[in-house]
Image (spheres, rainbow, N blue to C red):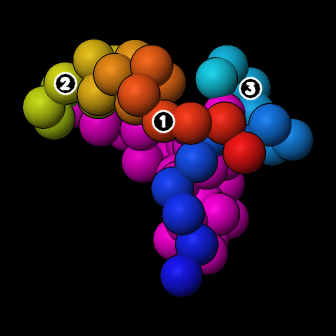
Amino acid sequence: MARLRKSSTDKMLFGVCGGLAEYFNTDVTIIRIIFVTATILGLGSPILIYLVMALVMPTD
């Protein structure tokens, strides 16, 4: 099982979406679309969750 880590190769800001895509074995574009859609629709606090993950997740 892969470990959840920020991606150092597939990143736009901090590599959180790239790391999530590697962990769930999916395309990074899908993860990014989910984050943007959740932000636009106001589902929870995706920006806050992203920032916390950027601070907590280790880099690969």
**Mark 3 or mark 2, which has the lower sequence index?**
3
Task: Give coordinates of residue 1: x percent, y percent.
Answer: 53, 82
Residue at 29%, 28% in the rendered image: 49
Task: Give coordinates of residue 44: x percent, y percent.
Answer: 13, 31
Asked which secondary structure carries label 2, the reply is loop
Name the residue nearer the viewer: 36 or 20.
20
Disc 3 and disc 2: Cα gap in Å? Answer: 20 Å
**Mark 2: which amino acid?**
Ser
Is label 3 or label 1 in front?
A: 1
Name the residue that disc number 3 marks. Answer: 12
Asked which secondary structure carries label 3, the reply is loop
Residue 28, compared with residue 9, is above or below; it is below
Name the residue that disc number 2 marks. Answer: 45
Residue 10, compared with residue 20, is above or below; it is above
Would you say 52 lies left or right of 21 here? Answer: left
Magenta stretch: dominant secondary structure: helix
Q: Residue furthest bottom?
A: 1
Name the residue nearer the viewer: 33 or 6.
6
Task: Give coordinates of residue 17: x percent, y percent.
Answer: 57, 43
Q: Quadrant of residue 40?
A: top left
**Mark 3: which amino acid?**
Met
Is label 1 or label 2 in front?
A: 1
Disc 1 and disc 2: Cα gap in Å? Answer: 18 Å
**First to last magenta residue range:** 15-41
**Mark 1 or mark 2, which has the lower sequence index?**
2
Would you say 12 lies left or right of 35 here? Answer: right
**Mark 1: which amino acid?**
Met
Pointer 2 local density, CA inside 10 Å: few below 14, some 14–19, many at least 20: few
Residue at 29%, 37% in the rendered image: 38
Disc 3 and disc 1: Cα gap in Å? Answer: 16 Å
Name the residue that disc number 1 marks. Answer: 57
Numbered circles on residues, count: 3
